[in-house]
């Protein structure tokens, strides 16, 4: 058993970690307010197998596969537009009418995703995870739109205004997710596949895919049942299921 002198620094470290977690993200995302995103994703009535690349049961070490994360052809712009027209929430998203630099949001998101080599479904689910933008039927507050992906918004600190605006957020999110993916491949990223690291919960996670590394570099939380990468997994799985039911999904 360690002495009191050895235990004290550990207690201080634990206290600092708890303080960081408390001020940064005590539970669900601050701007996420869609309660149905926390419901279990139902299995398809058809009895089809689960969507390839995303586990049917949450595994904090494997949020999704690399093949799914990097599949830029899972959906095209027309299919994303149809998704916005008829969302998993039983409504029509305001994003169906939104534009980014004069281009329909669906086209702009798919273009940015493909340019970065990221699955567009990962991107649209990220918008929902961060700010509940997909489930909204009317245009949300500009403050939400300006930081739609939470990109440039470190935990516990103010957002960087250099990334303010939906156009900048789309590009920032896509390139950031790709950068951390490539960092895992190279072995010099914030999170690296096969290398154990503590989240801010704090829990130990050993990513089993580069995609999982990227997701934790973007959001260093597990938060099973309440936010973090559990929510990213649950929303992405729900969206993939919905797209599959619409006949719009091309699996990797």
Image (cartoon, grey):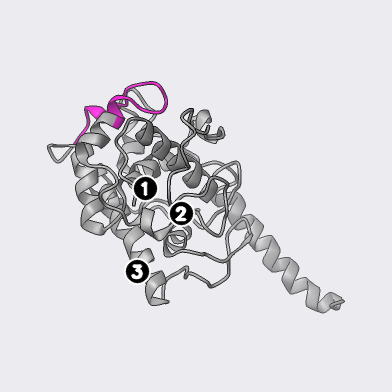
Q: Residue furthest left?
A: 102
In the rendered image, which quarter contains the N terminus? bottom right
Q: Is residue 187 left or right of residue 162?
A: right
Q: Is residue 19 left or right of residue 244?
A: right
Relative height, residue 120 to residue 47 (above, below): below
Q: Secondary structure at mark 2?
A: loop
What is the quadrant of residue 124 in the picture?
top left
The alpha-carbon separation of the residues under discs 1 and 2 comes to 10 Å
Q: Position of residue 239 (x, y in %)?
A: 40, 37
* Residue marked by disc 1: 122
What number is the disc on residue 64?
2
What is the quadrant of residue 179 in the picture?
bottom left
* Residue marked by disc 3: 182
Identify the mark nearer the N-term, 3 or 1: 1
* Extent of the magenta region: 83-99
Q: Secondary structure at mark 3?
A: helix
Q: Secondary structure at mark 1?
A: helix
Seen at 69% across and 61% down, the residue is 15
Cβ–Cβ under 8 Å for marks 1 and 2 = yes
């Amino acid at each position: 058993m360690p002495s009191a002198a050895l235990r004290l620094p550990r207690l201080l470290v634990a206290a600092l970690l708890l303080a960081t977690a408390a001020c940064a993200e005590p539970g669900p995302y601050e701007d996420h307010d869609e309660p149905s995103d926390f419901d279990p994703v139902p299995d398809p009535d058809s009895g089809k197998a689960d969507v390839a690349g995303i586990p049917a049961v949450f595994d904090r070490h494997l949020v999704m596969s690399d093949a799914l994360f990097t599949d830029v052809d899972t959906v095209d712009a027309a299919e994303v537009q149809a998704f916005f027209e008829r969302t998993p929430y039983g409504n029509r998203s305001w994003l169906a009418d939104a534009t980014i630099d004069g281009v329909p949001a669906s086209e702009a998101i798919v273009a940015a995703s493909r340019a970065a080599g990221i699955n567009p479904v990962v991107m649209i689910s990220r918008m929902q995870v961060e700010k509940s933008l997909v489930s909204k039927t009317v245009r949300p507050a500009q403050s939400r739109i300006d930081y739609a992906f939470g990109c440039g918004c470190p935990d516990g600190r103010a957002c960087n205004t250099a990334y303010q605006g939906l156009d900048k957020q789309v590009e920032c999110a896509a390139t950031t997710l790709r950068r951390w993916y490539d960092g895992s491949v190279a072995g010099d990223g914030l999170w690296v596949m096969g290398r154990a690291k503590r989240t801010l919960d704090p829990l130990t996670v050993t990513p089993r895919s580069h995609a999982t590394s990227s997701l934790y570099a973007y959001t260093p939380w597990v938060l099973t049942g309440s936010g973090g990468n559990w929510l990213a997994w649950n929303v992405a799985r729900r969206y993939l299921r919905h797209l599959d039911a619409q006949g719009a999904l091309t699996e990797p």
